[in-house]
Image (spheres, helix red, strand yellow):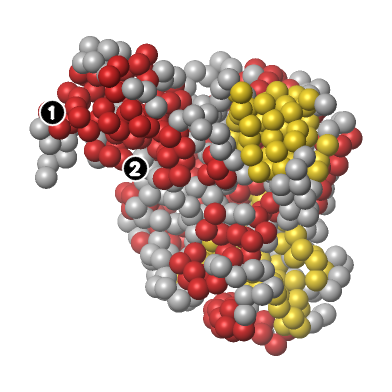
Amino acid sequence: MTRNEIIEKVNALLAEEFEVDAEAFTSNANVKDTLSLDSLSLVDLVALIQQNYKVKIPVTDLRTIVTFNDLYDYIESHQPSA
Amino acid sequence: MKYDVIVIGGGLGGLECGYILARAGKSVLVLEQGRQTGGCLQSYRRNGLKFDTGFHYVGGLEKGQPLYRVFEYLGLDSLPWHRMDETFDRITVAGREYALSQGYDNFALRLAEDFPNEKEALKQYASLLSETESRQLDGLNPECQEDDFASSLCETNAYQYLCQSFRDTGLIDAVSGASLKMELRKSSLPLFTFLHGNSGYVGSSWRLKGSGSLLTGALAEGIRKQGGEVKCRAGAEELIGERHRIVRVRCTDGNTYEGDVFIGAIHPALVCRMIKQDGLLKPAYRNRIFRQTNTFGVFTVSLVLKPDELRYFNYNRYVYRKADVWSSASPGEIDRVMISCRVPEDGAYARQIDLLTPFLWEECLPWVQTEIGKRGEDYLLWKERIADACMVLAETVVPGLGDAVEQRYISTPLTYAGYLQAPEGSAYGVRKDAGNPLEVLLSPRTPFPNLYLTGQSLMMHGVQGVTQTALFTCAEVLGRDWIWRHIVEGK
């Protein structure tokens, strides 16, 4: 997947699963705040990314993901090789 | 009237939560859809005898073991518990017999007689079992920040761990042989589930003289004594929310009940299905719950024996036709069976024996649309054929069993699905996965601040696992500190 494809797909997925308008997902917006995530729904997010992109986010890495850009970067750099 | 706590589901976990919260002074209502409480522990009566579905023996009830303290608090210590023989499980794999014995050192020593080259590895394994047992309630300690021990066990694959620990595959079979009470699955079973499913029993193993419904009956009575209510034939249908909280539950009979706190003590997918209002529950959580897969079901042959024919044996037998107990049977093949003898009311002879074998829902599919009691002649024939296969295997270790049988009753995963609403007739609820602990280890918390979950699908299954999970669920309501002081430390 190219970066633009990732952005498009991740945004569509998150908008649907967390019922938030995708227009709020700007690259520098805070993921937790935008999706209103608490520690429990953060697990939903991690599970969702793993389920859809086969990318596992360990707890230690999770702390480094703050903005949507961080999330796209993480998925892009951890994509399983085709 | 508005209740402090409404518990949905009158199985072991729901009743334990109901009991603890009622004893803590909360007004409690437990709603059970079936005619009787008990869930997987309920028993049924035929010709004056009681039969169990999911209950055969319990580990960890000796004074000093963590479950003992909890059972004491729940008023369950005074039930007629019956200590099993020192060798509580006898495992036969491809004709070779192994003994699993009570006491952690003893367990290792006895197995080392069969596997002398593995003595050190066995010692280490037994000490891990012992540590798992003694630390099972650590997560409730208010002074314990994170339970790293439990987390690392959750992320370790049980089969890989055994392969790394033991060189002799016969020993892997021996230590895994009593694990028909969980789903042995090479690719997913976490070491956490495996150890917890074995450790308490090695500490001490017990049968109940009488049926498993004694346990749940005592809890229901305890709830009522403390002013709580337990209603049967009260199937919850919808959880109704207002402003991101659950405010009431509507039952199939049209009654609604208001509450401050709700506990879903049924399969989490069933709880999610009860939340029907648009926008109340985000798809991310609902879909995660719906993505979970379920463990296998169990096929049970309940035998009534002729009087004075077969001596009672105070241990369980597990028989496997072939080596490698971690490989599942081919469809339609019965390659393993657990044989459990019920403690006789009096005398030295057994009156009831259960044969259990893991069973896949896929094999029940032809009859999924049929109703209990009206499944048709082909279903009855199919059940009898499988029961015959279980008998053949059981007779290899209990000679004369067939001749001693007076009557037999059969239950299948369809029975579980029919009576307990268990999705896919699953015996142990949601399948745990060491490769993906975050996704499958469900928290007692839900997206609603006043809706919690409990029961075998969360952390652990079995009597011990469900009891432990109930403590964690109640800790969300009363605080860890309260649970620790009143129940674990018993002050």
Q: Is mark 1 on a helix, strand or loop?
A: helix
Q: Position of residue B305 (x, y in %)?
A: 76, 78
Which of label 2 and label 1 is nearer to you? 1
Above or below, comparing residue A62 to residue B85 in the picture = above
Q: Where is residue A65? Give x, y as percent.
A: 27, 18
Identify the disc placed on residue B57: none
Horizontally, is B270 left or right of B61 in the view? left
Quadrant of the rendered image containing residue B18: top right
For image coordinates 52% across by 70% down, the residue present is B364
Provide residue A60's location: percent of width, then percent of height: 30, 22
Which quadrant of the structure image shows residue B379? bottom right
Q: Residue under label 2, please give it.
A: B435
Which chain does tag 2 point to? B
Both marks 2 and 1 on one chain: no
Quadrant where the image shows the C terminus of chain B: top right
Q: Which residue lies furthest to the bottom in this view?
A: B403
C-beta proximity under 8 Å, tags 2 and 1: no
Give the percent coordinates (x, y) of residue B52: 72, 62
In the displayed structure, B382 sits above or below B462; it is below
Position of B348 with respect to B183 (left or right) is right
Q: Mark 1 points at which residue?
A: A4
Quarter placement of the N terminus of chain B: top right
Nearer to me, B321 or B155: B155
| Chain where mark 1 sits | A
Q: Please, what secondary structure does the residue beneath circle 2 have? A: loop
10 Å crowding of disc 2: few (<14), some (14-19), many (20+) = some
* Crowding near the residue tagged with mark 1, few <14, some 14–19, many ≥20 C-alpha atoms within 10 Å: few
Q: Distance between the residues labelled 2 and 1?
A: 30 Å
Depth check: B153 or B250 in front?
B250
Which residue is at a point 56% across and 22% down the rendered structure image? B244
Most foreground residue, A69 or B315: A69
